[in-house]
Image: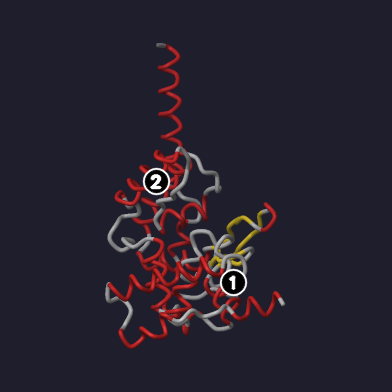
């Protein structure tokens, strides 16, 4: 009984400390300021880490107003379709994720919202544990209460990984298509969006057919739901080749 009591007290103390830290997120005031930049530590190639500048001080930083509406729509639809409806946690998706994990007996399905992914990238490690998942959820809740949805999406699109040592839509659009994010087409946007769950696995040079099938499924769904204009149907169904990447690999 005494051991159980100490365990409970330890858990409560840990939660109190975590909650105190989360309520006073370091750098939160800078995240609220569109003109500020922060330095975050992100995973790099070969298991290393590196510093990454998030904000206007990064030459690849792209304000949300200069990101193609097609890219924004495709990423939200692919990564977190209820992004504008939930408060950081998508209980429906988390329930599906839990059922999948229990069924397969392993951490098989993420279930993280865009806000949770942002919280993980900025403040947490990549370890796949229950503890990290709880902290991720608490941090997401805090971010949602401090930042507007569009600011969260702007930060996410500028820090998310699109390939080895390739972060942010500014760098991704120029690397894969040789153009700024503002002019990405529906087909290009869908291709970039479906790379996000695992950008190393879904590289065009690694699994081109898998990437193509994923892109076509996303485009078909968005057409069916009326989120892609009819005039853009033919272009969206085309499978644009990330020319720049292939040219560099030759």
Find residue 250 and report its horizontal and vertical position in percent: 72, 77
**Side of 129 where 205 appears, left or right:** right
Quadrant of res 53:
bottom right
Q: Residues within 10 Å of mark 1 (few under 14, many from 20)?
A: some
The residue to which callout 1 is attached is 58
**Side of 210 where 45 appears, left or right:** right
The residue to which callout 2 is attached is 138
Q: Residue furthest bottom?
A: 231
Indicate whether 54 appears above or below 247. above
**Side of 30 where 83 appears, left or right:** left
Residue under the image location 39 percent in, 46 percent down: 138
Find residue 140 and report its horizontal and vertical position in percent: 40, 52
**Distance CA(mark 2)–CA(mark 1):** 28 Å
Instruction: Assign the N terminus to one quadrant of the image.
Output: top left
**Side of 196 where 175 appears, left or right:** right
Residue under the image location 33 percent in, 73 percent down: 222
């Amino acid at each position: 009984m005494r051991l159980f009591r100490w365990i409970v007290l330890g858990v409560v103390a840990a939660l109190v400390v975590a909650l105190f830290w989360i309520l006073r997120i370091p750098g939160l005031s800078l995240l609220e300021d569109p003109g500020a930049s922060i330095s975050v530590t992100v995973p790099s190639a070969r298991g290393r880490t590196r510093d990454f500048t998030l904000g206007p001080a990064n030459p690849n930083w792209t304000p949300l107003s200069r990101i193609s509406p097609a890219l924004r729509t495709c990423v939200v639809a692919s990564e977190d379709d209820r992004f504008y409806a939930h408060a950081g946690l998508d209980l429906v998706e988390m329930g599906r994720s839990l059922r999948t994990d229990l069924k397969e007996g392993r951490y098989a399905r993420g279930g993280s919202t865009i806000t949770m992914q942002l919280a993980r990238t900025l403040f947490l490690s990549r370890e796949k544990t229950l503890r990290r998942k709880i902290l991720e959820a608490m941090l997401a809740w805090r971010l949602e209460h401090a930042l507007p949805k569009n600011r969260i999406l702007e930060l996410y699109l500028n820090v998310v990984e699109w390939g080895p040592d390739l972060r942010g839509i500014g760098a991704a659009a120029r690397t894969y298509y040789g153009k700024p994010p503002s002019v990405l087409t529906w087909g290009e946007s869908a291709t970039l969006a479906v790379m996000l769950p695992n950008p190393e696995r879904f590289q065009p040079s690694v699994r081109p057919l898998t990437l193509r099938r994923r892109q076509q499924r996303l485009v078909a769904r968005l057409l069916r739901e009326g989120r892609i204009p009819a005039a853009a149907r033919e272009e969206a169904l085309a499978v644009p080749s990330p020319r720049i990447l292939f040219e560099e690999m030759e």
